[in-house]
Image: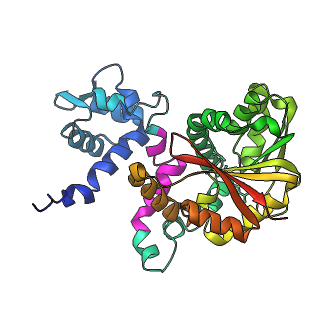
Amino acid sequence: MPEEPADVWAMADLALPFAVRVVATLRVADVVRDGPLPLDEIARRCGARPDPLGRVLRFLVHRDMFAEPEVDVFGPNATSDALRSDVPEGPQPWLDLDGAVGRADLAFVELIEQVRGHHPAYTTAFGRSFWEDLAHSPELADSFDSLMETKTHGLAPAVAAAHDWSRYRTIADVGGGKGVLLAEILRTAEEPRGVLAELEGPARHAPEYLRDQGVGKRTEVHTANFFEPLPFRADAVVLCDVLGDWDDADAVRILTRCAEATTADGVVLVVELLPDTGRMSEFTEIDLRMLVYVEGRMRDLERTERIAERAGLTVVDLTPLDSGYSIMECRPQR
Ligand SMILES: C[S@@+](CC[C@H](N)C(=O)[O-])C[C@H]1O[C@@H](n2cnc3c(N)ncnc32)[C@H](O)[C@@H]1O
């Protein structure tokens, strides 16, 4: 029997994702959370024009998001409630077109340029790279840091529980955001001291966060660029969700800097999503996002072993986590 083809029109649709992202950006679901309101009032509260907003909302009503109990009166339903900004770990901040990731998604329009080998998609769309954009815009940088914080809150307890961190005296998290993972690790293992190395923005927010988490006195924070020599030595140097942001040549440079920062018997611990037969749709989607946002790439174990080798490291142990992430323990070839 021939396989039923998927609905290609539905696969290629742009109207629905853009309509959802427009209402996510305007936070319409928050505005109507307590019940239906006239369109003019919704538009006023969202800073939008009534006519185009009404057409977006009516289109969404016919896709089961929002209700229109009377003409030009729109109210919530279960799907619009899922788009409220107060849903814990909900989709709204990821879809907000003014946020770092919602904006980066707009670069998919230029994917064809990248595939034809002309220009990177993000730079074509916005005139500078993703990282340059964050460096120029505190709002985008704050949005990105807060999205990463949400993502890492989900991952950190499993990483902290899956490895014996008590065997180290010093644990450094390189590119560790404001320190969500490091704080979780230091709460699990009470002896080691922590080092956080980050760019200026996240590094600025880290001391207060680490203090609030009760590990401030055991942690030092360095403003550091992981393409340059790192200003500390540690027994364990952690890189969580960092290598996927970079192509192989840059990933080798980062790993080399991390290897140099280890103490005599130290290790580099790479925490990354690995491909897994049950999760290939998620893995390939993140790989494509890395290509479009930052010209990065997701890697399987073999490719990670190859770049580690080029940085003078050998992957000696692998701890898979339920989430599809793994902790890859790498030892410098001294
Ligand atoms: C995808 S985020 C992961 C953050 C954190 N490890 C986590 O899992 O939540 C990548 C991090 O790399 C940092 N980063 C990017 N370029 C960097 C550089 N040149 N030196 C140091 N950190 C950098 C970013 O600021 C960002 O926090």
Start and end of the magenta stretch? 93-110
**For the point 35% across and 36% down, which residue is it?**
43
| Image height of 13 relative to 309, above or below | above
For the C terminus, give its image quadrant. Answer: bottom right
For the N terminus, give its image quadrant. Answer: bottom left
Front residue of this view, candidates 148 and 27: 148
**For the point 19% across and 59% down, which residue is it?**
9
| Image height of 241 relative to 38, above or below | below
Spot occupied by residue 150 in the image (x, y as percentages of width and height): 57, 37
Q: Is residue 283 left or right of residue 73?
A: right
Instruction: Inspect the magenta stretch and tell me whether residue 95 lies in it.
Output: yes
**How many labels sit on residues?**
0
Q: In the displayed image of the protein, which residue is found farthest to the top?
A: 34
Q: Is residue 126 visible?
A: yes
Front residue of this view, candidates 221 and 279: 279
**For the point 41% across and 53% down, which residue is it?**
277
Q: In the displayed image of the protein, which residue is found farthest to the left?
A: 1
Q: Is residue 301 left or right of residue 317?
A: left
Q: Is residue 178 left or right of residue 322?
A: right
Front residue of this view, candidates 40 and 164: 164
Spot occupied by residue 40 in the image (x, y as percentages of width and height): 30, 32
The quarter of the picture where residue 80 lies is: top left
Spot occupied by residue 234 in the image (x, y as percentages of width and height): 85, 48
**For the point 57% across and 60% down, which residue is it?**
301
The quarter of the picture where residue 151 lies is: top right
Spot occupied by residue 82 in the image (x, y as percentages of width and height): 37, 31
Q: Is residue 76 visible?
A: no
From the image, give the main secondary structure of the stretch colored magenta: helix
| Image height of 88 relative to 305, above or below | above
